[in-house]
Amino acid sequence: MRRHSTIPAAALAAAVAVLAGCGAMGTMGGTSAGPAVGPAIDPPASAAADPYRGVRLDVIVPVFDPGLPDDPDDYEKEGVWPELRRAEANRFAVALKKALQATGAFGDVRVSPDARATGDLYVIGAIEKSDGQDVKIAVEVVDIGGKRWMRKRYRHRVKEYFWRDPRNRGEDPYQPVFDDAAGDVAKLVMKRSSEELATLRQIGEIRFARTFSQETFAGYVEERGGRVTLTGLPDRDDPMLARVRAIRVRDGLFMDRMQTHYEGFAQRTDTSYAAWQEHSLTEVKARNKARGKALVQGVVGAALAVGGAIAAVKGGHNRDAGTEVAGIAAAVAGGLLVAKSFQNSAEGRVHAEALSELGESLDVEIAPQVVELEDTTVELTGDAREQFRQWRSFLKRIYDEKGVPETAL
């Protein structure tokens, strides 16, 4: 009698699954296509991925409003470290500038001390919150004709794993807010017609020209209710316009030189600022943990308070209610304790001193420089804002006295 072996049900099911898989993948020598392997020719880029080919507006990004309270006595209450915020005002402008450049939708993008610089589009930012964990900025876009294109807030929350991922080394955890804002501005430009964008460039040229000769160029634009419209254009070969265009080239070169100072400032603060961001994120989370224990009624408004929050957490771990209560109370009273803890910690002291020193002035400090046009020289001194003011006065004097400068900076 022939004996039959019994196949376990589980083994049978597994075999069926394997055979089914083989059928799905095809058999050796069969006609079913296997996975794609080997070199391939990339398909042509879609139209959406094509680079922007429209009129490119020149963009001015003024140094951000640091969001400091009007009354210095409110700094601590609102948890604002003024030196840090002043440094951030410059850093954020540089970050937004680079994000705008990366879109490929603009001409020259320059950081400036304020919105008086020459451009076609102005992207104006303000810091509303920055504590290492959360960043919130307000962005307003206004064209040279005075029309507001956009006013929007952007926010981002940094996760702790950002600092643990080695691939993020050298990256800014706040970058998403700048990328989002830049992307929105680029989309706004792409929606405008070439005629509208070209008109903005013409308005920009006439407004720049008016600062040198009001009587010559005032008649080409009309201002009403804060809006500027074009009413005409001078002849292409107008000698006065040619003079102004030559001066505008020099102005652009000066602004390009200023960019090296702003970007240099951002680079000098990179290490210290990243250390503060990581440190502050940790302390903010510790503060929130302490606040969550709710052992003291009415504990609110402990912005960036680290010393008391840490004491509260330690007290909770040690089951010392007195220490915990005192810690949370200290958190409420110490609106700037995160900054102070960072300043006093062994690893943060050097970085805190660097940030305080670099952030003492709202404007980037620039070494005195001597600028020469033709046979006339001038020494520019002070911070970026002051040197820009002196530079514009110098250009006006050159226009009035010398005509078109022929020597490049």
Image: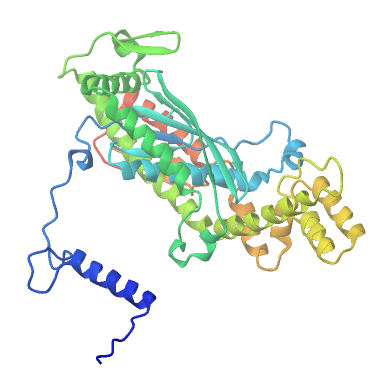
Q: In the picture, which quadrant includes the N terminus?
A: bottom left
Q: Position of residue 82 (x, y in %)?
A: 66, 44
Q: In the picture, which quadrant includes the C terminus?
A: top left
Q: Tell me if 377 is positioned left or right of 63 in this view.
A: left
Residue 382 is at least partly visible in this image:
no
Quadrant in which residue 278 is drawn: bottom right
Q: Position of residue 210 (x, y in %)?
A: 35, 17
Q: Nearer the viewer, residue 125 or 15?
A: 15
Residue at 74% from the left image edge and 48% from the top image edge: 336
Residue at 23% from the left image edge and 21% from the top image edge: 241
Quadrant in which residue 80 is drawn: top right
Q: Position of residue 100 (x, y in %)?
A: 36, 40
**Residue 235 higher or lower than 2, as above or below:** above
**Residue 244 higher or lower than 86, as above or below:** above
Q: Tell me if 378 is positioned left or right of 126 in this view.
A: left
**Residue 315 higher or lower than 112, as above or below:** below
Residue 316 is at least partly visible in this image:
yes
Residue at 55% from the left image edge and 58% from the top image edge: 274
Quadrant in which residue 10 is drawn: bottom left
